[in-house]
C-alpha cells in the first residue's frame, strides 16, 4: 500500500498534516550552508521546482532563505517555509521571543511550520516551549507546529500533557535523521499511529554512505545515483525528505526521484537494521560512564579521512559554483583566483569570510574541542609553527580567544586493544614510521607553551597505551587530561589502561578517526585538474594550467563547538595545510 502511494508521488505532491495544511513531500535543507551562499542556492532549488525550505535559528540563514523566497517570483503561499526553536530558547517566554525574532529576521508574516529543535532544557522548558508554539499557531505566526529529535519518552510526555487538559494543540510533524542506516522503527511507528507526518533530515547521511555497495547495485539497476536511491527510500517509507546541496546539478538530481520505484526486494535490501547517526542524537539520554571495564560505541564504516575529504571537496565545489556565476573575463588558467584568496604568503582554498562564522551564544556556553593531526614526514622543528597556525585559524573561525581541549595525534601510533604495549605502533596500513619518543616530548613542549598562555585549557593525546603513558607522563609539565583511543572492531578497553588512566586521573575517550587522515596523493587529487579536482595545480611539471610544484601535506585540524549541557553541535569543521615545493611558479 505504501509503495503504491509512493509511486504516484511527484515533486508537487503534499501530505496533509493534523493542522489541515499541506506539506510538500520533498524539501530543500539548508543546514550548515553559510548565509552568504544560502540565498543563491535556495533560489536555485526554487527554480528547480522545490516548494519547501527547511531552515532553523541555529543555522543562522533564515534571512537568506526569506530573501530567496521574496526574490523567487513566487507567491509566499507557494513556498512552505520552516524554522526551529533552538535549545537556547527553550521555555515559554524565550520561545515566544524566538518566534517573533525569527519572523523579523526572515522578513515574513508567518512560517508554515515551526519545530522545537531538540528536547533539551528539562520537562518544564519543553512543555513551556510547546505552549508558546500553540499560541503562535493560534495567532497566525505559524500554520503548523512540530517536534524534532524527540525520543519516545519525550513524545509520551508531550502527549500526556496535551491529553491531560493542561496543554493544547496537535503535533503536525516529527523531524528526525532518517536513512537506511538509521530507520528509527519505534519512533516512526509512534508518529504514524497518530497521523503525524514524519520528516527525514540528512536523508543522504551527510554523504558518508554513498559508496555503500548496495546503493551502487540499486543505482545501476534503476539508472540512478546512490543519493537518488536514498531519497527514494525515504519517499517510499512515507517520509518527507530534506536533501541538501549547494551544487545546481545535485539540487536537480536530488529532485529527479519520481520516475522510478524501488521494489519490495530493494527496500528489504536497504533494511540494514543499523543504528548509525551521523551527528547528534537527542532522542536518547546522554550517558556518561566511568570506572567500567569496557567502552561501548556504535560501529560504522565511515572514517574521518572520508569526512575530511568530502568536506573539503564540497567546499571547493560550492565556492567554484558561486564564483562561476559572477565570472566575466577571467583567464581559464586563473579561474581559481575568483574563489580563493591570497593573504600574506598563504592561499586560502576556498576564500574564507571569517565575518560569517563565530558562535551564536556567549563563549561560556561552549565546550570547544580541537584535534590536531601531525602528518608523517614533517620535521619536529616545524611543529611549533604548525600548531600555532592551526589553533589561530580555529580561534579566528569561531571568534574566540581560547579552546577547551586540544588532542594531538602523532603519526604512526595506533592503539591496539588486544596488546596494550609499547611495541604496538604502526599506521592503518603499516606504511608510516611512528614518532620517536624525543620527538613526541619536543612537540608536547610547544603545546604546554600554548597552555601557559591561556590559549588551551586542557591537553590530550591519542592512541597512548598504558606503557606509553607511563613513559610519557614523567617528562611532562602539563599532563594530558584525555587519552583518545580507536578501538576499531572491538569494544574492550584493556584493564591495564583503565587502571593506569584512573590512577593518573586521565579520561579515556574513543573515536573512529583514521590514523592516516590525509594519505599521500590525496591533496594533489583534491587540488589538481580533472573531474574530482579543483583545478588549482598544474597537470604536469611543464604544464601552464595551474600552480607548479610538489604538494606536501603538513597538518590537519578538526574542531567542534558543543553547547554545554545540551550536547548541541553548533559549529564543526576542518582546516588542512599543504605546502607547495620550492619550484612553485604561478602561471600567467
Image (cartoon, helix red, strand yellow):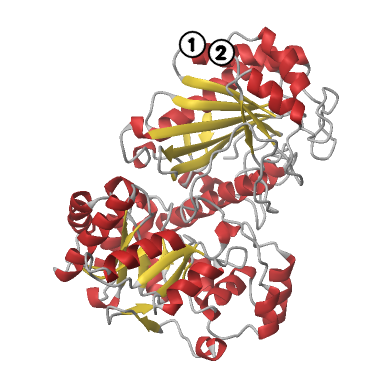
Extreme residue in the left direction: 139
Q: Quick check: 158 left or right of 267?
A: left
Q: Position of residue 555 (x, y in %)?
A: 63, 30
Please determine whether, in this image, residue 427 is positioned above or below residue 379.
below
The disc at residue 452 is: 1
Q: Rate crowding at label 2 as few (under 14), some (14 to 19) or many (20 or more) other CA atoms within 10 Å.
A: some
Q: Quick check: 532 left or right of 325?
A: right
Q: Position of residue 356 (x, y in %)?
A: 35, 42
Q: Quick check: 563 left or right of 139?
A: right
Q: Quadrant of residue 518?
A: top right
Q: Position of residue 308 (x, y in %)?
A: 61, 45
Question: Toward the viewer: 368 or 340?
Answer: 368
Looking at the rendered image, the quarter that the N terminus falls into is bottom right
Distance between the alpha carbons at the discs numbered 2 and 1: 6 Å
Please determine whether, in this image, residue 373 is positioned above or below residue 64.
above
Looking at the rendered image, the quarter that the C terminus falls into is top right
Residue occupying image coordinates x 49% and y 71%? 188
The disc at residue 448 is: 2
Labelled pair 2, 1 in contact (Cβ < 8 Å): yes
Question: Toward the viewer: 46 or 588?
Answer: 46
Amino acid at each position: 500500500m505504501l509503495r503504491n502511494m509512493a509511486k504516484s508521488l511527484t515533486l508537487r505532491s503534499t501530505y496533509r498534516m493534523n493542522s489541515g495544511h499541506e506539506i510538500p513531500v520533498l524539501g530543500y535543507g539548508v543546514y550548515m550552508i553559510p548565509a552568504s551562499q544560502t540565498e543563491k542556492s535556495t533560489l536555485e532549488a526554487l527554480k528547480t521546482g522545490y516548494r519547501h525550505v527547511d531552515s532553523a535559528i541555529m543555522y543562522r540563514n533564515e534571512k537568506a532563505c526569506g530573501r530567496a523566497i521574496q526574490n523567487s517570483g513566487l507567491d509566499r503561499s507557494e513556498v512552505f517555509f520552516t524554522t526551529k526553536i533552538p535549545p537556547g530558547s527553550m521555555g515559554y517566554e524565550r520561545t515566544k521571543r524566538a518566534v517573533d525574532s525569527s519572523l523579523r529576521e526572515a522578513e515574513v508574516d508567518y512560517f508554515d511550520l515551526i519545530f522545537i529543535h531538540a528536547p533539551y532544557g528539562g520537562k518544564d522548558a519543553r512543555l513551556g516551549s510547546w505552549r508558546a508554539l500553540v499560541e503562535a499557531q493560534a495567532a497566525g505566526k505559524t500554520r503548523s507546529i512540530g517536534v524534532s529529535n524527540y525520543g519516545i519518552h519525550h513524545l509520551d510526555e508531550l502527549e500526556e500533557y496535551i491529553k491531560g487538559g493542561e496543554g493544547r494543540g496537535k503535533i503536525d510533524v516529527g523531524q528526525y535523521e532518517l536513512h537506511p542506516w538509521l530507520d528509527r522503527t519505534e519512533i516512526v511507528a509512534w508518529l504514524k499511529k497518530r497521523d503525524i507526518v514524519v520528516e527525514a533530515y540528512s536523508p543522504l547521511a551527510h554523504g558518508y554512505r554513498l559508496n555503500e555497495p548496495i546503493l551502487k547495485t540499486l543505482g545501476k539497476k534503476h539508472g540512478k545515483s546512490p543519493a537518488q536511491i536514498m531519497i527514494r527510500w525515504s519517499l517510499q517509507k512515507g517520509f518527507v525528505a530534506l536533501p541538501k546541496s549547494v551544487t545546481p546539478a545535485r539540487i536537480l538530481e536530488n529532485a529527479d526521484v519520481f520516475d522510478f520505484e524501488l521494489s519490495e526486494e530493494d527496500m528489504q535490501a536497504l533494511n540494514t537494521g543499523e543504528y548509525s547517526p551521523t551527528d547528534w542524537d537527542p532522542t536518547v539520554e546522554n550517558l556518561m560512564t566511568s570506572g567500567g571495564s569496557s567502552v561501548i560505541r556504535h560501529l560504522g564504516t565511515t572514517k574521518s579521512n572520508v569526512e575530511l575529504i568530502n568536506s573539503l571537496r564540497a567546499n571547493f565545489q560550492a565556492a567554484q559554483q558561486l564564483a562561476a556565476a559572477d565570472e566575466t573575463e577571467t583567464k581559464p588558467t586563473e579561474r581559481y583566483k575568483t574563489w580563493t584568496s591570497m593573504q600574506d604568503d598563504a592561499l586560502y582554498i576556498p576564500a574564507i569570510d571569517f565575518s560569517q562564522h563565530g558562535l551564536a551564544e556567549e563563549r561560556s556556553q561552549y565546550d570547544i574541542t580541537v584535534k590536531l593531526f601531525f602528518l608523517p614526514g614533517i620535521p619536529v622543528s616545524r611543529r611549533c609553527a604548525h600548531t600555532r597556525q592551526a589553533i589561530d585559524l580555529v580561534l579566528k573561525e569561531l571568534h574566540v580567544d581560547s579552546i577547551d581541549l586540544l588532542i594531538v595525534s602523532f603519526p604512526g601510533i595506533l592503539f591496539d586493544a588486544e596488546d596494550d604495549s609499547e611495541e604496538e605502533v604502526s599506521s592503518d596500513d603499516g606504511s608510516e614510521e611512528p614518532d620517536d619518543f624525543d620527538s613526541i616530548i619536543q612537540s608536547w613542549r610547544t603545546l604546554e607553551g600554548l597552555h601557559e598562555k591561556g590559549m588551551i585549557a586542557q591537553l590530550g593525546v591519542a592512541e597512548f597505551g598504558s606503557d606509553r603513558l607511563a613513559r610519557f607522563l614523567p617528562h611532562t609539565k602539563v599532563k594530558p587530561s584525555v587519552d583518545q583511543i580507536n578501538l576499531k572492531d572491538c569494544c574492550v578497553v584493556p584493564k591495564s589502561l583503565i587502571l593506569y588512566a584512573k590512577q593518573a586521573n586521565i579520561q579515556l575517550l574513543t573515536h573512529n578517526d583514521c590514523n592516516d587522515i590525509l594519505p599521500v596523493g590525496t591533496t594533489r587529487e583534491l587540488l589538481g585538474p580533472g573531474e574530482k579536482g579543483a583545478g588549482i595545480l598544474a597537470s604536469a611539471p611543464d604544464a601552464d594550467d595551474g600552480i607548479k610544484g610538489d604538494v606536501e601535506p603538513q597538518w590537519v585540524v578538526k574542531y567542534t563547538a558543543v553547547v554545554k549541557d545540551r550536547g548541541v553541535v553548533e559549529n564543526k569543521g576542518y582546516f588542512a595545510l599543504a605546502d607547495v615545493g620550492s619550484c612553485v611558479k604561478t602561471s600567467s
